[in-house]
Amino acid sequence: MKKSFDYFKTFKILTENLNNIFKLSVDNKDYNKQYITFLANKNELTDYLKNDFITPIERGDIFILSDMFSREMNQINVLNDYSSFSWSELNEIIISFRALFDIQNNVFDKISFEKLNVNIVDKAIDGYNQSQRLVRDIYKLIKKTIVGYCENPLLKYTVYVAYLELAKQMNCTFFEIERIILNNS
């Protein structure tokens, strides 16, 4: 009997890759090795998805999740251009993102060892709520930068918007994770 491909384990690996890539990116370190690993794992997932007859969750949902992770990766690539800049509010944002990536990784860590169940939804909801708060916090920083006086307002605005886009994407990813778990448990 042919061994089936473990989609959840691959999602766990993809989220670990994203987590590591984000950490390296904000620390202004090279993440090419992890990026290549991310792309290889995503391509392997897509190749198996094309050929698998039966999957643990709907094929469309697997494709959506892998696309969400690719969008997160694209936003991290944008952020990498600004990784050499730092100020106190930015450090707080980075800490919030690290927590979000940890939550995302924990969701798939749990899924890869357990059957899909509603209890895992709580973790996804927590990630969704934290990403919502982060979006609001970044909007406040953008407003403060626009209406107040600060050094390098254009640079700060640009960097905040880049982080805002990643926060929005993670918010969408957590929403999809929640939907997929509820539909398949």
Image (tube, rainbow, N blue to C red):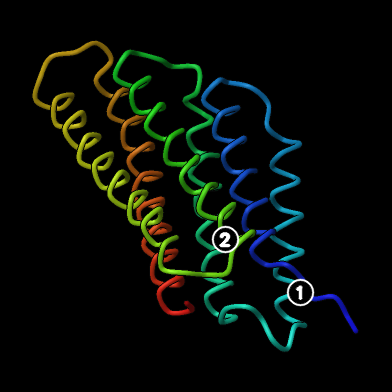
**Image coordinates for residue 104, horizontal then vertical, percent:** 49, 49
User: Nearer the viewer's eye, disc 2 or disc 1?
Assistant: 2
Tell me the residue at 76%/72% (across/down): 47
Q: Closest to the observer: 126 or 158?
A: 126
Instruction: Compare marks 2 and 1 and give the one earlier in the sequence.
Output: 1
SS under mark 2: helix
- Identity of the residue furthest to the bottom in this view: 53
Residue 69 position (above or below residue 63): above
Q: Position of residue 30 (x, y in %)?
A: 68, 26
Q: Residues within 10 Å of mark 2 (few under 14, many from 20)?
A: some
On the image, numbered disc 2 is attached to which residue? 111
**59 vs 65: above or below:** below
Q: Secondary structure at mark 1?
A: helix
| 94 and 8: which is toward the camera | 8
Question: What amino acid is at disc 2?
Answer: Ile
**Quarter-of-image position of residue 55:** bottom right
The residue wearing badge 1 is 48
Q: Find residue 76 and report its horizontal and vertical position in percent.
A: 52, 39
The amino acid marked with disc number 1 is: Tyr
Residue 101: x and y, percent? 49, 41
Side of 62 relative to 89 (left or right):
right
The image quarter in which residue 177 lies: bottom left
How many other residues sit within 10 Å of disc 1, few (<14), some (14-19) or many (≥20)?
A: some
Please report the residue visible at 48 percent of the width from the left and 44 percent of the height from the top.
75
> Residue at coordinates 59% horizontally, 52% vertically from top-left?
109
Q: CA distance from mark 2 to mark 1?
A: 19 Å
Compared to 53, does 34 lie above or below?
above
